[in-house]
Amino acid sequence: MIEQHDPHTGLHSEQGALPGEHPGRARNPVVKVHDLAWLEFEKPDLERAELFGWAFGFTTSLRTADELHLRGTDPGSPCVLIRRGHRSRFIGPAFQAAEPEDVLRLADATGTAIAPLPESLGGLTVDLVDPSGARVRVVADTHELPALPTEAPLAFNVGHDVTRVNAVQRPPRQPAKVQRLGHVVLQTTRYLQTLNWYLEHLGLIVSDFLYHQGQRERGPTMSFIRCDRGSTPTDHHTLAMTLGPADRYVHSAFQVPDLDSLAAGGEYLLDRGYQRSWGIGRHIQGSQIFDYWRDPEDFLVEHFTDGDLFDCTLESGWAPMSASGLAQWGPPATKDFLGMRPGRESLRELRAVIGALRENNEFDLHRLRGLMKAFTS
């Protein structure tokens, strides 16, 4: 009898750190940020960006000739700020300070000036630059947008637990209602240096580390990082960071109410000609049900629902990086999602690899081999 091997065995990060490995948190961070506030982009065509935003499930909270703010249904800040620019590019994330004094504390610790935000946002910001060159804002006292109506949860008959009788399920094929911004994923050639910067300055803590198979002794190459709110549970990751051949945005993720909203919203996007990158499936690290899409400027964005929440007591998990380890169920990770699709993107990635190998950074030939092995495993 042939023994069946489950490729997911050992990939759920229950294994913790070995002696001497990265602790996943700083002993005395400058501040502990409360959450991710918003993401900032530049794009040349705000009309096209707004049309995709509506189809994806956002609501416009501000629209001028040169600026677009897209929000979810939850109260708070807009999720995405887009300013008109000559080319499409990611500017950086903004984090919400736990209290206004933390902005002052961070400014003092870094020798950086505090500046007022535009009146459309309100409040103050301290603008920093992480070791990979990304602008990072920490903001406080911003205006709070009121909550918007959201989709009511469906009643489910789960197994023999019956809650719905003489009623049918007919979720409409319409844009998924984005509730909030969940996380952003960044790639850097200076992974360890950049990771430590976020832990030390913003008080983030690592939920899960991934390492290249056969290279654990060299340390991790990806981390899923959450906010530290003490005993209050927070998203498994607010920021994820991975080692790669270029400093760049990878994707961002936005919460929707449930699987039906996610799936019906995906059908709505397909009907309008937008490109699904990968999905629908359920992740391992974070457990989210996911669906990835390309916007008209080729940025990767994710709908997600049912993610893990951790408090400060859970230590970091460790697991090997692999393509099959990206999901518990769902279709295999696509070349588009992995950044390996033929065309301009793959040529751009090849040039980045060549450039990174010539420079003094953490992305060397051994890391390249480990990454290629992970993509094909």
Image (cartoon, rainbow, N blue to C red):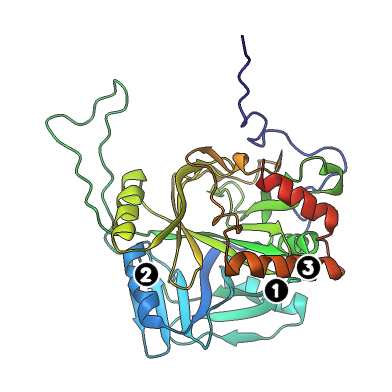
Numbered circles on residues, count: 3
Pointer 3 residue: 354
Residue placed furthest toward the top: 1
Camera-side mark, 3 or 1: 3
Q: Is residue 148 left or right of residue 8?
A: left
Depth order, front residue of 374/311: 374
Could you say which quadrant of the image residue 255 lies in?
bottom left
Q: Is residue 123 left or right of residue 134?
A: left
Could you say which quadrant of the image residue 289 lies in?
top left
Q: Is residue 246 visible?
A: no
Query: In x, y percent, where is residue 40?
Result: 53, 76
Up the image or down, 47 lies above or below 8; here it is below
Residue name at image x 37 percent, y 61 percent: 74
Q: Amino acid at mark 3?
A: Ile
Pointer 2 residue: 53
Query: In x, y percent, where is residue 45?
Result: 42, 83
Q: Give the mark, 1 or 2, whose residue is nearer the N terminus.
A: 2
Could you say which quadrant of the image residue 126 lies in?
bottom right
Depth order, front residue of 122/275: 275
Secondary structure category for the residue under label 2: helix
Residue name at image x 46 percent, y 85 percent: 44
- Asked if the residue at tag 3 contacts the one at tag 2, i.e. Cβ–Cβ closer than 8 Å, the answer is no
Query: In x, y percent, where is residue 154?
Result: 26, 42
Q: Amino acid at mark 1?
A: Leu
